[in-house]
Amino acid sequence: MGRKRGHASEKEDGSPAKREKVEEPETEVKDEDDDKPVWSLKKAQEEQPSRQCPFLGTIDRGVLDFDFEKLCSVSLSHINVYACMVCGKYFQGRGTSTHAYTHALDVDHRVFLNLSTLKFYCLPENYEIIDPSLEDIQYVLKPSYLQDHIKQIDKNIKMSLAFDNTKYHPGIVGLNNIKANDYANVVFHALSIVQPLRNYFLREENYISIQRPPGDKMNLLPKRFGELIRKLWNPRAFKAHVSPHEMLQAAVLSSDKKFQIIKQSDANEFLTFLLNSLHIGLNGTSKTSSSIIYKTFRGRMRVFTRKVLPVDASDEARRTLLETEEFREKTEETPFLKLTMELPPPPLYRDEKLQNIIPQVPLSTLLNKFNGVTEKEFKTYNANFIKRFELIRLPEYLIVAYTRFEKNRFFVEKNPTIVNFPISNVDLYDCLAEDAKSIHKFTTYDLISNIVHDGQPEGGSYRVQMVHNGTGKWFELEDLHVKEILPQMITLAESYIQIWKLNRTKTRAERAGESDDLPMDAQAAGMAAPKG
């Protein structure tokens, strides 16, 4: 009787016969490039990914958080990282020997998202999942904006609803304070509402293809900053706050750990570093048009410098020295990204009631530094100089920094002086040089953000107050805390850094009748008037 092919048989002497070699219908293959399936499925299954995955109901959007660094929670690798849609953890790979595959078998979590390709897979079966209901997850991971959408952002007055039922205004959302990074959070918030800067970074194609030399530390900074801006303005977020973890990691790397997540730093110094680093990372040059940073914030001033004459010199010697090149007044033009204004020193003594006097100074007094007439002495290690300043080109957005802190060899002192300023219609016409006044049709500025420092110099904290363009309302943000405030409350705090927007809708003559004590004229600033 004939035996079936492929079955074991015995020889006539009783010894077992050799098993005939047969072809297995399915063989396990290694997932080297992570593009092939774990099991060699039928051709039809390979060409048409599943559209009816039975495990979509296990996805938990409440635990998904794509703000943190994209690395495997087991191997700490950045390559081929997948996010588990059930628990939110990150794992590497998709093959049989990978951590994602092992996780799927261990805890029966089946749906995974490739954080680079934005494709969904079911493990351990390893087929791609295509379902329209997953598009919201892809958008949260990588928000994208069309030009038409960007044009409407500043006109939007409606609040968005997060997955956790929290209402929020896109762009006015909290930032997580991981340890001591509130100094960076306020800078991110303040820059995120600068319209040309925001619009540039909302479109990833503007900077994603910029090439830097291999190993350049500045290469990562613009990409991470763009990701943060897109998440801050996401109208379809799962939660009403964002963690700046990846952006902070890039800042730590780019600054050679000068700025850290776990150590408090100076917000003004961080702002200077960030603007210059973004300019370099965008391949900016010395030309104003070379990067969005210079286009937005760069102005020019004229500086007059002369060396101080010796105190013990006679009148005749002074006249002789003034004719020499060393003591003759020199003029130079220099660009600036922000204006620094020195606060007057606080009083040394208490008043008659033995109470500390809180000094105050008007912004107009501080602006006199740039009127071309006011002289200020600057001391160096070997000589003293007298300088005068005047502006020759106004930037679209003016950054003002007050010298709130004074450092010496032993400690840091904080100046508590309150700056009195209107939040709209600040005119810089008198700060312009005579030859520059004729080419500046618009010279008035409106406040859009105000960074405040509270507490002691070493152990204080930062918060930021900024306007929402759509509604014209003011909000105060301190890490995760967001609240609406009255505009009159802004001038009561110890302002440290401010960003002002040049008003291009009305000239200084047309705005002459506007009251400085009232909130910013929303219509004049190109905003919708607040309701109610």
Image: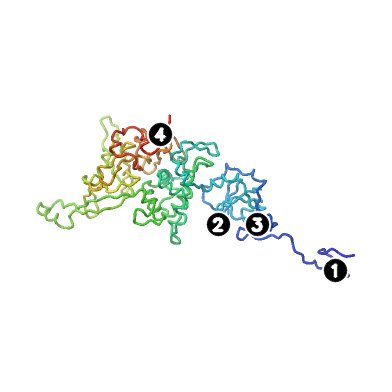
The residue sitting at the right extreme is 1
Q: Residues within 10 Å of mark 2 (few under 14, many from 20)?
A: some
CA separation in Å, label 3 and label 1: 41 Å
The answer to whether residue 331 is left or right of residue 297 is: left
Residue at which label 4 appears: 529
Q: Quadrant of residue 427?
A: top left
Residue at which label 3 appears: 37
Residue 109 showing in the rendered view: yes
Residue type indicated by callout 4: Ala
First in residue order: circle 3 vs circle 1: 1
Residue 89: horizontal and vertical position, in percent? Answer: 58, 48
The residue sitting at the bottom extreme is 13
Residue 410: horizontal and vertical position, in percent? Answer: 32, 48
Residue 97: horizontal and vertical position, in percent? Answer: 64, 57
- Looking at the rendered structure, the secondary structure element under dot 1 is loop
Residue 284 against residue 407 in the figure, above or below: below
Q: Residues within 10 Å of mark 4 (few under 14, many from 20)?
A: some
Residue type indicated by callout 1: Ser
Question: Mark 3–mark 4 contact, CB under 8 Å?
Answer: no
Residue at which label 1 appears: 15
**Which residue is at a point 30% across and 35% down the rendered structure image?**
358
Residue type indicated by callout 3: Pro
Residue 474: horizontal and vertical position, in percent? Answer: 40, 36
CA separation in Å, label 3 and label 4: 57 Å
522 vs 29, nearest the viewer: 522
Which numbered mark, 2 or 3, is in the foreground of this view? 3
